[in-house]
Each structure stands twice: as structure tokens, then as C-alpha cells.
Amino acid sequence: MTQTVLLKSTAGKWIMVSTILASAMAFIDATALNVVLPSLQKSLNASGADLFWILNAYLLMLASLILIGGAMGDKLGRKKVFMAGISVFILGSAACGIASSVLLLVIFRIIQGIGGALMIPGSLSLISSSIDPKERGKAIGTWSAFTTVVTMGGPILGGALADAGLWRYIFFINVPFGVAALIMLWLKVKENHDDSADKSLDFPGAITIAFGLALITFGFLRIPAVGLYNWQAYGALAAGVVLLIVFILIERKSKHPMMPLELFANATFSGANLLTFFLYAGLGAGMLFLSLNMVQAQGYSQFQSGLTFLPFTVLMISLARFAGSLADKYGPKWFLIIGPAAAGAGLLILSFVKQTNGPADYWTTFFPGVLVLGLGMSFTVAPLTTAVMTSVSNHFSGTASGINNAMTRISGVFANAIFGALAVLFFAGMLQKEIQPLKLDIKEKQTIMQQANNLGNANVPKASGNQHAAQIEKAYHNSFISAYGKIMKISAGLGFLGALMALVFIRKK
């Protein structure tokens, strides 16, 4: 059994720096890529459907394989699997940077996803199993603070590179991060494994869960494009759910289960994962529509929109480590009730923001909501991860991290798909009311309504002429702000639901 080390020790510091550097690659890649998409699209002559697959090929592989990555670390050695993941991720990133076509970029994004699935659970698994239990929350808080900084810094970096025509550097920047992490792990961090752990791999379980999660992820990703009632969406979702049920049956009977079902008998573990799903679904949808509102309706540039989240980042840097230390001392329960409730309150405050005068009004319009949301998440992230990782024994730390990360990823996909479809419904409903008083024939109204799928990017149809153009433009604007408000209120409700999960399930210690 590997001995744990103190956070302040030399070994503890090397573990923290190497895991933060490796995690930074994945988080920068995830947030910065969204910002450089227009430059990438122009450079590769990519269609809208191409962009969809460039973004989601990575996510599809990550969500499918992340549970397997966590379980492999527990069984085969956490450092070994973590380093393998970093190596694959670096190769995928470098290949993405030199991709000459959309098809090659999608293939290389798939390779990145495979590397990410091995790498992402490994960072928290190494921290949780290597750092002294009394300092685990503080260590996770430190990791959370630094990874949040790079996550929020991603859009700012992406905006700067996109403006300079250097979108490929979003991928190349991962290489020095990854190489530095590999050198530190190789020279300074000891292998971490449980000698009593079962080394046998559960191949039937691994294949079933990979295909099950892939189908569910694919189903959610197809909803915005084809609708919920298209066979591609409901067929993939139904098949995915069937495979998850088969996976549970396999795990119940397996002598070497990849995901021991007894983990879910622990109320804290189950409750923390339910909290993760609801809170991150609400947060993902809230952040997405907040950014869209700022750029498409309020007149912010992409760079200004990225800067508006700086208060959130500053709070995470300042408070995440402190919150982790408090969770070590007092237990995570009350932090996981108050934190998600405050995050929900922040999203609710943001839902009441109507039309503003742009960045000049930021401090009196969006800032109060961003501040409350930031405070809520600052007191949630480290205690939540601590609750997950300390609710299981050390030899399941990789599996636990994989499950929790899978919950985060799938909730994000779920939020984008379901909330994207809901936003179109809300937008179309409001738009119908807005154009009702206008003297337009049925065909003109249908042409105007067809733009509803574009939300904030809806353009006045040329056939409408100049007579009603300004009124139609205003109708689109009002409809988007109305849809934004409703989506933010639902996102807030998911934050409050997360707090309820903590109240019901999380134990005090």
C-alpha cells in the first residue's frame, strides 16, 4: 500500500503541480476552443455540422471511456495510466494543431478524447490516494482553484489567439504543459497502487458501459439538430439506457467488477453524484446562455464576455482552498447545502436581467448575479469532490473520480441538448406573440418563425422588406431575452435541487 504524504512535503508539492498542469491541458482545450471556432471554420471551410463534430467528437469519447480510465488506474497503477493518458492527449493535441482538413481534425479530436478519459480521473485519484486524509480537502481545493483559473482563462486566451489568426496554437499550447507534467511524474512522483486491488479487467462491463454512455451522449448531442422525436435521438437514448441496465446486471454477477455497485450503497457517494449532475447541468446551461446573451443581445465582444467571469475566477482562487480546509475540519454537508443554493440564487438573480446598455452597465446588472454564483461555487467545488473521494476506500479512488467526472460531462451534454431545445421553444412562443400585431400574411410570419432555431443570431428575412424590418428585429431581440430569462430560472432550479440532494443524502462526516 502506498504511504500518504503531507501537502507541504516535497513529494506532495510535486504531485499537486503535475496533476494541475495535466488537468490544465484538458480545461484550456475545452473552454478556449469555443472561442476560436469562427477562425477555425473559415480556415478549414467547415460547415455548421462540421463544427458540431469538431466540438463533440472529443466529448463523445471522453464520456464513453472515462469510467474505464478511472477503473484502469485503480487496477493497473494510477501514475502509469495517468501518464499514458497525458501522452495520448499530447499526441492528439499536436495532431489537431497540424490537421489540414475537417475529417482529420475530428479523428484527432477522438484521439484527444481517449487520452482525456485516461488522464482526467487520474489527477484526482492520485491526489486523493497520495495526500494525507486530514489535508485531502485542502489539496482538492488547491487543485480546484488552479484548474478554475485556467478554465476561465481559456476564453480570454482563445479570443486573443483567434484575433491574431493563430487558432492552431490552442492545440499546440497543450504540448509543453503535458511534457512538463510527464517529466515531473516520471522523476518525482512514486507509482500509486493498492497491492490488494484486483488486477483483472472486466472486459464485458467495460465494452457495455462504453457503448452505453456513447449512445446516450450521441442521443443528447443529436437532439438540437434533429429533434427529440427523430429515431436517431430517441433510438440512441433508448439503446444507451438498455446497455446501462445490461451493464448493471454484468457488474452484479462479475467476479472482477469494473464499477462495484456497493459504492452506491453509500448515501454520501450517491447523493454527491446526484448533486453533481443537477448542479453542473444548471451551471453549464446558465454559463452558456449568459455568454450568448452578452454577445448576441447586450453588445459585448467575445473578449469582454470572457472578462465578465473574472470575479468568478478571483473568488475561486481566493476561497476554494479555504473551503476545502473547512470541509476537512467540519465535514462537507453544510457547504454542499449552502453552496449549490447560493449558486442557484446567483443564476436566479441573473435571470431577471433584461436589456442593458452593454458593458457600461455590467456592475449594476450582471455583476451581482455573477458574484453570488461565484461565491456559491467557491464553497461547493472542493467540498463536493472531497465528499465523493472520501466516501469510498482508497483503492476505489480512480473509479470514484471516473464516475463523478462522467456525471459532470454527461450533465453538460444533457444541458446543451435539452436546454437548447427548450430555448428554441421559448423563443418561438414569445416570437409568435411579438409578431401577432404586425400586418403580415401567413407566409411572411412562417418565414420569420423559421429563424427561431438561430435564437440570438436570428436574421430578418429579406422578403419582409423595410416596412417591418425594425419591428421584426425588435421581436427577435425581445424573444431571445425572454427565452434567456426562462432558461436561467430553470438552471437556478437545478442548483436548488442539488442543494436538496445534499440535505437528504450527504452525511455530516
Image: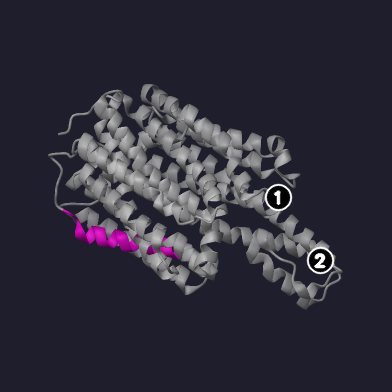
Decide if residue 260 is in sight here: no
Say which label, 1 or 2, has the lower sequence index: 1
Q: Nearer the viewer, residue 197 or 101?
A: 101
Q: Nearer the viewer, residue 509 or 10?
A: 10
In magenta stretch: residue 143: no
Which residue appears at 30% of the width and 59% of the height? 209
- Secondary structure at badge 2 equals helix
Q: Which residue is mark 1?
A: 299
Identity, as a three-letter code, of the amino acid under mark 2: Ala
Q: Which residue is mark 2?
A: 469
Identity, as a three-letter code, of the amino acid under mark 1: Gly
Query: How far apart in space, not on screen, are marks 1 and 2 (Cα)?
Result: 19 Å
In magenta stretch: residue 219: yes
Q: Which residues are magenta?
A: 201-220
Callout 2 environment at 10 Å: few (<14), some (14 to 19), or many (20+)?
A: some
Q: Position of residue 106 (x, y in %)?
A: 41, 65
State the mark number for residue 143. none
